[in-house]
């Protein structure tokens, strides 16, 4: 195991309930560690996760980030005890949901791809977290749901991320009924990439991360940014924008190296710093 290289400071008044470790020199795992309570996303945890992601991303050698969890579930969403304690505090709620939105958008804007490794149920904001990651691998026992309607709190912010992954009809069904989507259905509807036996979850996720980490950093960074920018553009705008992106990409050393390596029938030597 590589030495942990991430240096960051958190609010020490509350438990952080996550750990950071290097899987390889280029891959970092951020693991939610409050498995006994199904990894609720408190306000402080959300803030600390956002900061941790920024700190990890700033490390030039890091090429892929994995978000996983301990315990039987990935995340049950927002901390309901915290919501009850602040039941008459609208300012708190606005801050909570704003910070959660910042966390989800931070994941999209990181230059590194982020993979969700889902070991069990992902509900409400937990499902939102999975949907916000670039890729997701889940165990066959996993399930996904937006059950807020069952407790009088419609999953309005989670639906932003989830509705950008699956069809309108399916997400409306999930939102209006609160029913679960199985891991197999989640693959079918595009919420996750694949489901695997639980005993293979860690190795299969890591293998996917290693495959992505083997690609040139500059190319992956350009591609991830371009994907999220073009996806909501009109067809004409998207082609105009991506034509410019590809022209810029062609100016990169790695593009010239990759083309030459292919033509010369050799392995490329990427320009990694």
Image (cartoon, rainbow, N blue to C red):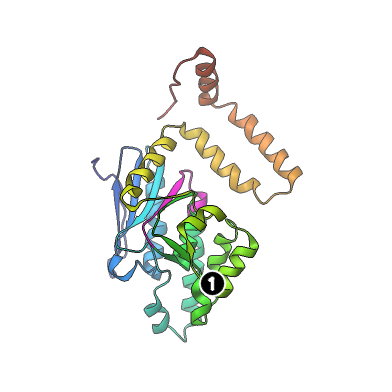
Pinpoint residue 190: horizontal percent, then vertical percent.
55, 53
Return the residue at label 1: 155
Q: Which residues are magenta?
A: 107-120
Pinpoint residue 169: horizontal percent, then vertical percent.
64, 64
User: In this rendering, is residue 246 above or below 135?
Assistant: above
Question: Which sits in the foreground, 182 or 144?
Answer: 182
- Magenta span has 109? yes
Which residue occupies 30% across, 39% down? 24
Category of crowding for the residue at label 1, using alpha-carbon neighbours closer than 10 angstroms: few (below 14), some (14–19), many (at least 20): many
* Residue 33 in view in this figure: yes
Which residue occupies 64% across, 62% down? 168
Q: Is residue 87 left or right of residue 27?
A: right
Pinpoint residue 183: horizontal percent, then vertical percent.
46, 57
Quadrant in which the N terminus is drawn: top left
Helix, strand or loop for disc 1: loop
User: In this rendering, is residue 164 above or below 13?
Assistant: above
Quarter residue 246 falls in: top right
Which residue occupies 41% across, 60% down? 142
Q: Is residue 173 left or right of residue 254?
A: right
Which residue occupies 69% across, 40% down? 241
Pinpoint residue 270: horizontal percent, then vertical percent.
44, 25
- Magenta span has 22? no
């Amino acid at each position: 195991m590589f030495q942990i290289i991430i240096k960051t400071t958190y609010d020490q008044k509350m438990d952080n309930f996550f750990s950071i470790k290097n899987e390889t020199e280029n891959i970092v795992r951020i693991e939610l560690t409050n498995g006994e309570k199904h990894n609720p996303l408190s306000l402080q945890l959300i803030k600390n996760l956002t900061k941790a992601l920024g700190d990890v991303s700033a490390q030039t050698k890091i090429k892929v980030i994995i978000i996983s969890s301990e315990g039987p579930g990935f995340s049950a969403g927002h901390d309901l005890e915290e919501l009850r304690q602040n039941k008459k505090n609208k300012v708190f709620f606005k801050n909570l949901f704003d910070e959660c939105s910042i966390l989800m958008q931070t994941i999209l804007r990181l230059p590194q791809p982020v993979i969700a490794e889902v070991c069990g149920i992902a509900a409400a904001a937990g499902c939102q977290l999975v949907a916000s990651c670039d890729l997701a691998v889940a165990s066959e026992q996993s399930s996904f749901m937006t059950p807020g309607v069952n407790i009088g709190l419609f999953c309005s912010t989670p639906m932003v991320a989830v509705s950008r992954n699956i069809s309108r009809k399916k997400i409306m069904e999930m939102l209006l009924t609160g029913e679960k989507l199985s891991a197999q259905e989640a693959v079918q509807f595009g919420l996750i990439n694949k489901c695997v036996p639980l005993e293979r979850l860690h190795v299969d996720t890591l293998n996917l991360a290693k495959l992505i980490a083997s690609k040139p950093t500059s190319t992956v960074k350009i591609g991830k940014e371009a994907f999220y920018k073009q996806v909501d553009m009109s067809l004409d705008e998207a082609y105009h924008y991506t034509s410019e992106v590809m022209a810029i990409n062609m100016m990169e050393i790695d593009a010239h190296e990759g083309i030459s390596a292919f033509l010369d029938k050799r392995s490329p030597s990427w320009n990694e710093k």
